[in-house]
Amino acid sequence: MKAFFTLVLMVLLTATIIHAQAPALDVPVFHPFTGTVVLSAEAGPNVSYTDYKFDALSIDFTGRGSIEYFFPFNSKSIFGLRAFGEAGYTKGKDDSKTITKFRTSLIDVGGGLIYGLSWGESVFPYIFAGGSYQWYTPKDDAGKAINIAAHNHHRAHFRDGATKGGQHHGQQCVAFVPSQ
């Protein structure tokens, strides 16, 4: 009788333990962005930090568009890819320079990796690391191309009067999604 009671008690405890664990295994946890594509557009001021003097008039505008894809993951963290393109202008003025004013168009194309987390249903911190390639053609205030090599402003790669170069990018953000 003692062995029978022990066997019944073990079966009941085991069944309870298995039953308590079973629903957690059946309900996977997905990041809300899993398997999604995100399109975004941004625009705003561009502050020029150059060898020209800084003043409030050296602020111009830029815009960026991007597409992101988040891989399907069965967790609260997620990985994704981002591709972006950016276009805008930068300008400066300094009376002590040979060319006193400039306004230059910028084009930037790049991409990188995203790692994100899910804190609840509407807070999603993430980090981005990537690189880009930038093209710009320095022009004076009248729109005439500037020969930078002749003025020895900086060292860069030249082709047909255009300057180009690689850059690296890093970003830490928190995205908030309004509740529905």
Image (tube, grey):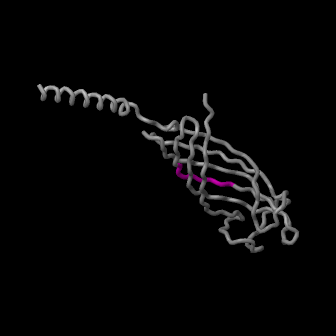
Residue 23, above or below 150: above
* Residue 55: image location, x then y, percent: 84, 61
Residue 47, above or below 21: below
Determine whether, in the image, residue 134 is placed left or right of residue 126. Answer: right
Viewer-nearest residue: 172 or 142: 172
Viewer-nearest residue: 43 or 166: 43
The residue at the point 38 percent across, 33 percent down is 24
Q: Quadrant of residue 135?
A: bottom right
The quarter of the picture where the N terminus appears is top left
The residue at the point 48 percent across, 44 percent down is 77
Determine whether, in the image, residue 150 is placed left or right of residue 115. Answer: right
Residue 119, above or below 49: above
* Residue 23: image location, x then y, percent: 36, 29
The residue at the point 61 percent across, 28 percent down is 180
Q: Main secondary structure of the magenta part?
A: strand
* Residue 43: image location, x then y, percent: 72, 46
Magenta segment: 107-114
* Residue 54: image location, x then y, percent: 81, 63
Q: Is residue 21 magenta?
A: no
Q: Residue furthest front?
A: 2
